[in-house]
Image (cartoon, rainbow, N blue to C red):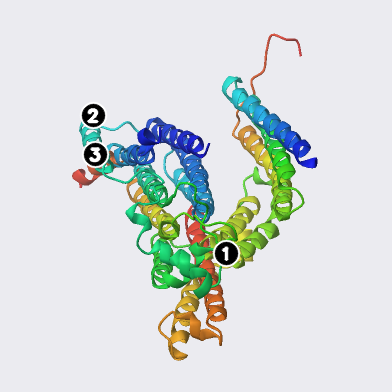
Amino acid sequence: MMQPLLDVLSWICLLGGAIFLLIGAIGVLRFPDFYTRLHAVSVCDTLGAGLVLVGLIFQGGLSLVTVKLLLIFYFMIFTGPTAVHALAQAALQSKLKPLVDDHEPR
Amino acid sequence: MTELLGHYNYWIVIILMMTGFYIVIARPNLVKKVIGLFIFQTSVFILFISMAKIEGGTAPIIEEGLSVYSNPLPHVLILTAIVVSLATTALGLALVVRIQEAYGTSNEDDIHVQDEED
Amino acid sequence: MEHLIDIVLLGLLMITGFAIVRMKSLLAVAMLTSIYSLLSASLFVVLDAVDVALTEAAIGAGISTILMLATVALTRDEEKAPRHTPLLPLAVVTVTGAALIYGTLDMPHYGDPAAPVHQHAASAYLHDTPGEIGVPNVVTSVLASYRGYDTLGEVTVIFTAGAGVLALLGYRTRRRNIQGPGIRKLVVLRVIAKLFFPLILLFALYVLFHGDYGPGGGFQAGVIFATGFILYALAFGLGNAQRVIHHPLLRIMAAVGVLIYAAVGIEGILLGGKFLEYGVLADDPVTGQHLGIMLIELGVGITVAAVMLIIYYGFVSRQD
């Protein structure tokens, strides 16, 4: 009874995660400069990979696998944003100017 | 399908191997040469692991209810080879650093020119 | 499905390889090499080699990249165009590649269970491991027990490489902790590094002692252990890291690991067995095997961790 429901939920999460990862990848290709690309990647990666992990947790059920997946989830929500933050910080320090639209009044 | 793809892994491995080989012989920068060697090494790892795979097998960790396992022997050989590859890469890069300090360049052509001047 | 993943990953590997050839910026090439290693680690998981994948991810994508970046920082980061036309190398590569592809035509197909590779020793290892060694992970049992001599040799190679890098690069202790104005701003990175440093070391110990039952073992654990200290050095500066773990201590530990391994072998002789025969270490042969594997994995882990840190210190302390 529960199994089909769990399967559907996990498929929704997996597909949703895959879509977000795809959006992130398109963002990297399409956005004009470093900071906007970083933005696309960081937001979509955390959400996308997180959703994939949640989908896998539905498949794992109550077992040791789920505990390990939760640990990976915990590591990821910390390391991903930190890495992107460090990268942006390093870019700023090496005097990489963000792309700003000069035509708009600021 | 399988008939056509039976050697797919090996062919890609050979292309990767030749990519690394080309970098080693055609590029003058010494860091790039070490990286070419690294690519060559990794392609050899993929060759061995591809040979170890058995259709429908699982990772060689024995468990109830499983009977087909992939071949563990190449895994062991490659596991240690990876660590040794890091050792050789580190030694190669250390040599590059010393050459850079002695000649002021890590470009092979410039080093030859300097050697001929002496 | 598995074939599809295999094909896609190999295709991506090929694209990355070509990109490495074409790129002129060495910084980008070093990062692409890291991607190349990560892709091959994913491929190893698909090909059932989980132990190898763990090693490749930690070493290829982790420590190798750091060493290459350190070297690029010490040399120039732009590659000059080659002086000669690449026609001759291209011809050599094409001919060699064609000859090798012709050679593969005689090879058995990918995944063929009847291939000669699977006929000789591997089936015996798979069959005898549960009874003789009593550990589920056959890779560990072959690595540490059946082919223990081989692994002792590999550990000695690692030790020698560490000695070689030490001879080439030496080491300089930092009395003051030299910090650029930048590193002080990395508050977020430092907090996270402080949070994760103990967890990484804990994970290394888990990988070390769980290697009998799942993927893992001394080589991977040593590398992960070293990675924890490298993270610490990156976030807090090399001087602080050298205060946590001294260079002389590392040199002693690198030797101690190899000696533990060899001592287990000699202990076997003293107890009436052969060199590296673990069965005699305890009353019950299977318990003896467990004990022996645990001890030599510990030795491997200590040596690998110490040598990785010696190499890292050697490269980074050159930067002034």
**Which subunit holds the residue at mark 2?**
C
User: Are the numbered discs 1 and 3 placed on the same chain, yes or no?
Assistant: yes
Q: Which of C41 and C163 is in front in this view?
A: C41
Which amino acid does the dot numbered 3 rest on? Tyr
Q: Are marks 2 and 3 on the same chain?
A: yes
Where residue C244 appears, as percent x and y from the top left, is: 64, 65
Residue C262 drawn above or below residue C110? below
Separation (CA) of disc 1 from disc 3: 40 Å
* Label 2 crowd bin: few (<14), some (14–19), many (20+), radius 10 Å: few
Question: Element under label 2?
Answer: loop
Is residue C58 or residue C26 the one in the foreground? C58
Residue that numbered label 1 is attached to = C211
Relative to the observer, which residue lies in front, C245 or C42? Answer: C42
Q: Tell me if I can see residue A87 in this picture.
A: yes
Q: Which of marks 1 and 3 is nearer the N terminus?
A: 3
Q: What element carries label 1?
A: loop
Residue type for callout 1: Gly
Instruction: Give me the C-alpha separation between circle 2 and circle 3.
Output: 28 Å
Tag shown at residue C85: 2
Q: Which of marks 2 and 1 is in front?
A: 1
Q: In the drawing, does residue C202 fall left or right of residue B43?
A: right
Q: Pointer 3: what residue? A: C102
Name which quarter of the figure residue B7 lies in: top left
